[in-house]
Image (tube, rainbow, N blue to C red):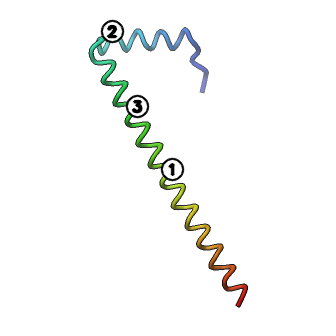
Amino acid sequence: MAAIGIPGLILILIIALVIFGPKKLPEIGKAAGQTLREFKKSTKDLTEDVTDEIKDTKDLVKGKDNK
């Protein structure tokens, strides 16, 4: 994917301002922030679940080796 750069970012922001208007942009930004925050939380929870399962499996295998 090509880098957008500062001029491209400014152009995108101007187009968004024209399309959505100045009153709607803060709402859209807030919704995007909440979505990203929820995605990050879900990803972290899933990673922790997988890590816990791997740890439990390792502990189970080590327990069988000791017997």
User: CA–CA distance between discs 2 and 1?
Assistant: 36 Å
Comparing marks 3 and 2, which lies closer to the viewer? 3
Image position of 9 with respect to 53: above or below: above
Mark 2 and mark 1 residues within 8 Å of each other at the beta carbon? no
Asked which secondary structure carries label 1, the reply is helix
Q: Which mark is residue 33?
A: 3
Residue for point 35% across, 11% down? 17
x%, y% of residue 30? Answer: 35, 27
N-terminal of the two: label 3 or label 2?
2
Q: Quadrant of the C terminus?
A: bottom right
Q: Is residue 57 left or right of residue 43?
A: right
- In the image, what residue type sits under mark 1? Lys
User: Label 2: how many residues lie within 10 Å, few (<14), some (14-19) or many (20+)?
Assistant: few
User: CA–CA distance between discs 3 and 2?
Assistant: 21 Å
Asked which secondary structure carries label 2, the reply is helix
Q: Which mark is residue 18?
A: 2
